[in-house]
Amino acid sequence: MKRQLAVLLWILSSTAALTAQKPLSVGGVTAAPGQKASGWIEIPDAADPGTRIPVSVVHGARPGPVLALVAGTHGYEYTSILALQRLLPRLDPGRMSGSAILVHMACPPTFYGRRIYYGPDGKNLNRMYPGKADGTISERIAHAITKEVIDKATHVADMHCGDGNESLRPYSYWMVSGNEVVDAGSKEMALAFGLDHIVIDRERPSDPERTLYTSNTAVRRGKPAITVESGGMGLTDEASVRAQEAGALSVMAHLGMLEAPSVRVERPLWIDRAQVITAPATGVWQPAVEKMQSVATGTLLGRLTDPFGNLLHELRAPFSGEVLYVVATPPASAGEPLAFVARLAESEPRP
Ligand SMILES: [Zn+2]
């Protein structure tokens, strides 16, 4: 009798644990189960002026995965910022299993300052992870997103497009870390997001203290993650915004968070070799190719001149493939990207 009572109590308590979700807090935002709330992650002034990051927490009535959707890491990349504005009213936490953390704009100083690549501290937020609590603004933002968003999520989608100067065709990155379970989860997320060109990326750093990238920070903490790219050049075209919105919804469906079908890429084009062509010198860039264009080894990608028009360098394709993005405006600083050339794999990769 005593044993039966104990079993009954155990069943009751474990059922209660399954059905009663605790509130979910991100920064200054707390949502009760079955509710959504919006507010801010405050980044106080320190070495330089602080900011506040707009976030929404959509906390499902039932437990499940916690998907972080991070928009606007680069503030001139508008498609993801607009996509999350559209997504928020479409999410009904009362019908969701699991929760979504929407980071509407990871780096407000780059958005309001119309900055490409770099924050006001001259640093690229997507090279600062896991960040520093006492660093400059980009480092403090990275630290806050690591602690408040990535650490509270089970899955992460970092949403980008070509920056204000980049003409880009849609694609995603599948980061392969060597952790088979995580890598398999990330691969399925990439397929569910719906962009058919998928770059297989095996070269992100493994040191947890130097993960640099948003998605890699999640992956190295054992959480499946993807980076997606749709749009560019500071545009807000419908197709690019819709691809971000639809991709986020499809990943949520794939994870079982929504009672909706997930869309999966039927014929993924895996990219097993990709190279960012960087500027060998500072100068004036004139591209000779467009996004999506096929190139052969040696095809002229563009010319770099000095301010007077004298040729400094001709940049050529290092191998045959497709142009995923090309910088389409003239400023070029030494070491910065000018084009991204990719080669399609012959077969589906493992794991
Ligand atoms: Zn970006």
Image (cartoon, grey):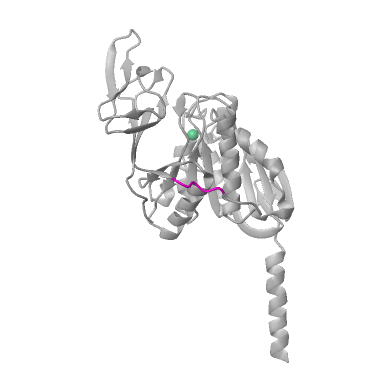
- The question of residue 289 being in magenta is answered with no
Q: Is residue 142 visible?
A: yes
Give the residue at x 59% y 32%.
108
User: Which residues are drawn in magenta?
Assistant: 263-267
Residue positioned most to the top: 308
Left or right: residue 25 versus residue 75 is right
- Depicted 293 relative to depicted 270: above or below: above
* Number of numbered discs overlaid on the protein picture: 0
Left or right: residue 252 versus residue 164 is right
Q: Position of residue 52 (x, y in %)?
A: 63, 36
- Give the main secondary structure, helix, strand or loop, of the magenta stretch: loop
- Depicted 21 relative to depicted 347: above or below: below
- The quarter of the rendered structure image containing the C terminus is bottom left
Give the residue at x 72% y 69%.
16
- Depicted 241 relative to depicted 102: above or below: above
Q: Position of residue 291 (x, y in %)?
A: 42, 27
- The quarter of the rendered structure image containing the N terminus is bottom right
Q: Nearer the viewer, residue 283 or 296?
A: 296
Residue positioned most to the left: 298
Q: Is residue 140 visible?
A: no
Q: Position of residue 139 (x, y in %)?
A: 50, 39
Give the residue at x 31% y 21%.
281
Q: Position of residue 276 (x, y in %)?
A: 35, 33
Give the residue at x 48% y 35%.
170
Q: Nearer the viewer, residue 88 or 256?
A: 256
Residue positioned most to the bottom: 1
